Amino acid sequence: MASIQQRGDRKFKITVCNGYRPGGQKRMQSRTIDVPREIPKRNVMQYVHAEAERMEKRYRCGLDEDDRTTFEQYAESWLKRQTHYKPSTLASYQRELKIVYSYIGGIALNKLRPLILEEMCAELRKRKKRNGEPVCEATVRKYLQTVSAVLEDAKRNDILLYNPAHRVRGIRVERKVQRIPGEFEMRKLLQCILQEPLLYRVFYLTAITTGMRRGELCALRWNDLHGGGAVTVQHSRSSVLGQGIVESSTKNHRARTVVIPDLVHDYMGELFLEQAREGRIIRPDDYIFSTAEGPAHPDSFTRRLRRIYQKNGFPTEYHLHTLRHFFATYLLQNNTSKQVAADLLGHADTSFLERTYCHPQLESKQQAASVLAEWIQPAEDEAWEREQKQMNTESAG
């Protein structure tokens, strides 16, 4: 609680706690204020207590949360405190907030209402993509979710009574189903990948057989390989706009161990020898997927796989992450436990795995249909026999 001392008729000294020193002593901050003459005498203490509360919030949040604080000011303060996010995630938040600033950035934080945010969403739906098409509803919801994260922080710090973003009515859209290649398509893709240069061949084979993300594959080093085909996944390299290539921890900030098949392990050995034949001095902490010029750019693997898809007639919606979806789906269809699959994919629990990677294939649906067919067939046979007996009885009569 703030300490208030009266120093004159309308002069007060306000002292608040601004955290603690390493030794445990309180770090105190003081400010002397003069109550304006236009404030009635009976309301002087109300004014002083309001100023004291404002000071406490300023030191707690790094910002003076009054009617003058705009959404943009608070959002920029919020961004500076999000040190736990990966650089790529933080850059994504910055891009999205920069867009919404033009709609709500100048509005006072405590003046934001659901209607204002609904109007913002309506304007965002009018935005055009690079190809001239309007942005999809999922993109609009993504902008709103970022705004909601900022407002939720303000609510958590007792600056807002509620999060107005939670009261915005969105347009219901049918969730787009991720198309996953079947085994026949994947065998066809494997034949195409085996014709690729060794660097890309090893990269795509590792992606298919481990389900690792693109950034995790690009961050693999030779000393991450261990006996028995075990591979430690502990870093990720990604391209961040304005920052170039940035290396960070994995998406859930945890290291995990995956196992690569013997065939892929042998290909990695060939890749090591190929790099050595180029005259390169290979150190244990060098990146596996690199060239003589340095580590390969993550986008190069995405672009090359897209060309493979186009050249060989694969669906246009296939991308590099499709390999990860196939890995997860194939494991689950072949009775791998969800916990093991989640651990291999780097998920903290199975709930996200079930929502995102459980893709029933046509073969599975046909098997389900056959189960019901076997159940109803005896009833159908019995009904047919009764019908035949009735027909025979009528004919005899």
Image: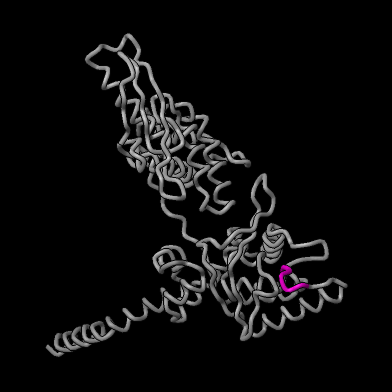
The residue lying toward the viewer, choosing from 174 and 111, is 111
Question: Residue 390, how many percent across, how many down?
Answer: 16, 85
Find residue 308 and report its image quarter.
Answer: bottom right
On whether residue 364 falls in the magenta region, the answer is no
Of helix, strand and loop, which mostly describes the magenta segment?
loop
- 240 in relation to 123, above or below: below
Question: Residue 74, how many percent across, how many down?
Answer: 46, 35
- 179 in relation to 161, above or below: below
Quadrant where the C terminus sits is: bottom left
Question: Residue 193, how many percent across, how many down?
Answer: 70, 72
Farthest top residue?
A: 38
Q: Please tell me which residue is depicted at 25% across the width and 12% down the height of the picture.
A: 41
Judge left or right: residue 136 versus residue 220: left
Q: Please tell me which residue is depicted at 40% across the width and 42% down the height of the picture.
A: 26
Farthest left residue?
A: 397
Judge left or right: residue 125 versus residue 117: right
Quadrant where the N terminus sits is: top left
The residue lying toward the viewer, choosing from 260 and 318, is 260
* Segment tinted magenta in the rendering: 283-287
On whether residue 284 falls in the magenta region, the answer is yes
- 65 in relation to 252, above or below: above
